[in-house]
Amino acid sequence: MPPSTITPERQAYEAMLATLSEGSVHVHFDPYEDIAWDAPELAIDPHDARWVLSPTVDPLGATAWYRAQPLERQVEIGRARMMNTMKVGAAFESMLIRGLMQYAFALPHGSPEFRYCMHEMTEECNHIQMFMELVHRTDVEVPGMRKRLRRVSPWLAGVLATRPVLLMVAILAGEEPIDHYQKALLREGGHLPPAVLRTMEIHIAEEARHISFADEFVKLRAPRLPRGQRLALSLLFPVVMRTAAEEIMTPPRALARRLGIPPEVFAEAFWDSPASRRIMASYFGEMRTLAAEAGLMNRMSARVWRWCGVAGEPARYRGEPDRRAEVVA
Ligand SMILES: [Fe+2]
Ligand SMILES: [Fe+2]
């Protein structure tokens, strides 16, 4: 874009990209340099009581059935549940990398997004390695993603890359639930096995940049989309959020069966009970704020947010603890 046509918003956006890129250069983590995997304090103890799922943050941990299990069973289920979420997270990051790579190489010469996208993908590769190292060291065999999504994942992000604003919404939909889940656990005091805690701290620190980028991208571009596309995006936004959160947070049924979770408890946790619905809605406070700021909240889309069970108050600031998420009956 010639300098004379650069708007102040565009200028601020480009400055933000430069700041994020600098941030990636100066504050970044390597999964093997920055995590002392072999240190005794990070040794993974399969019987550690800190594998027990949180009753407020985890929808399965919130069920009366889970709380009534002997400690040993709570530990066994918690360990598999947490590692499955890590493995799904890694698979989502691989989709994100595919989408961003395709997007970045379709950009015109000199686009300021190119450099930052490369930094982000490097970080996501590190996250995949970090999560998978943890899963391997925990030595619990978990399937990860549910089958249906696993089948379409190799090409889905590539298709989304042809609609960059939708791609960024999808990226946020993958990042927000994990970021929220991890932040909420840390806020509760981080009663987690030390190796899990360390990976979460690193992940939260780097995700902040990724989320800022996608947020600003959507804020800049969504209002400039043609009207029909903008309306379609406003309706798809909550659907994408709900779908991604479900895929990330719901373990495959085969795993639930293997762990002996009764079908009615599985249904209650994912996502029939008021407690689990509240948790689902709580993932998206910042996304409700973003949708409003990007002109993607209207009467029709607000209804879709409610149908999808992701409605509630918008967050007043990034990282606001869940106080007011609406329970959708
Ligand atoms: Fe990540
Ligand atoms: Fe990310």
Image (cartoon, grey):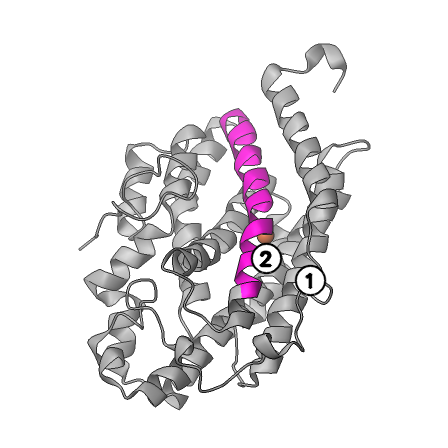
Q: Residue at x 68, y 16 (%)?
A: 6
Give SS at disc 2.
helix
> For the view shown, which residue lies furthest in the top direction?
4
Whether residue 133 is visible here, answered yes or no, is yes
Q: Is residue 197 left or right of residue 213?
A: left
Q: Nearer the viewer, residue 234 or 120?
A: 120
Q: Residue at x 72, y 47 (%)?
A: 119
Would you say residue 138 sits in the magenta stretch? Answer: no
Could you tell me which residue is drawn at 52 percent across and 50 percent down? 170
Q: Which residue is mark 2?
A: 202
Q: Which residues are magenta?
A: 198-225
Q: Which residue is pictured at 32% across the width and 50% down the height?
A: 310
| Left or right: residue 180 compared with residue 5 | left
x then y, percent, for residue 208: 55, 45
Q: Are marks 1 and 2 in contact (CB under 8 Å)?
A: yes
Name the residue tied to disc 1. 34
In magenta segment, residue 217 = yes
